[in-house]
Image (cartoon, grey):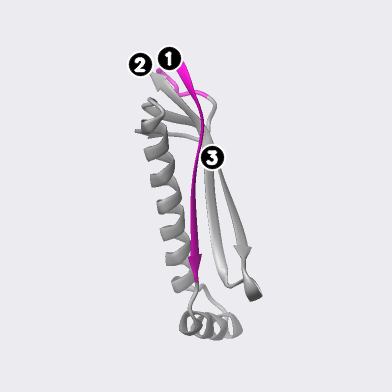
């Protein structure tokens, strides 16, 4: 399935709009990840643990978006927007949401 942030797909013609589709993922960070990420933040550098969790959440949200587009009859999603939020007590959870328009292209 083609998934793009652009409103159209170069070289493809949109023949039908199937509606807005979304995908979400909410992941919690555990105490040990928080502790080691905090240490990393103190000494500088990147937190590979959080980067992996962010990538995992993004992958889940996009996979869910594709599934919903397929269920709506689409074979592509255009105009995709990714949003990131922290939620929960002490911002202990990460939410990634993806939204776009399911379309049929030929």
Q: Give the range drawn in magenta.
A: 8-28
Quarter of the rendering occupied by the C terminus: top left
**Which residue lies at the image location 57% right of the left edge and 83% below the top edge?**
38
Q: Earlier in the sequence, mark 1 or mark 3?
A: 1
Front one among 44 and 21: 21
Across and down, in percent, residue 28 comes to 50, 70
Asked whether, in this view, residue 6 is left or right of residue 76, the answer is right
Q: Marks 2/1: CA distance?
A: 6 Å
Extreme residue in the right direction:
90
Which of the 4 quarters of the picture holds residue 41?
Answer: bottom right
**Which residue lies at the image location 34% right of the left edge and 33% below the top edge?**
1
Q: Mark 3 points at which residue?
A: 99
Q: Residue 26 in magenta?
A: yes
Q: Which of marks 2 and 1 is nearer the N terminus?
A: 1
Q: Is residue 99 above or below residue 105?
A: below
Across and down, in percent, residue 95 comes to 55, 58
Q: Marks 2/3: CA distance?
A: 22 Å
Across and down, in percent, residue 50 comes to 49, 70
Disc number for residue 13:
1
């Amino acid at each position: 399935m083609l998934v793009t942030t652009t409103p159209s797909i170069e070289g493809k013609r949109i023949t039908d709009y199937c509606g807005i589709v979304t995908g979400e993922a909410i992941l919690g960070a555990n105490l040990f990840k928080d502790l080691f990420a905090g240490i990393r933040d103190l000494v500088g550098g990147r937190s590979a643990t959080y980067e992996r969790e962010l990538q995992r959440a993004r992958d889940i949200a996009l996979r869910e978006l594709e599934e919903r587009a397929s269920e709506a009859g689409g074979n592509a999603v255009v105009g995709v927007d990714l949003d990131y939020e922290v939620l929960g007590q002490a911002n202990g959870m990460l939410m990634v949401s993806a939204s776009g328009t399911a379309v049929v292209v030929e």
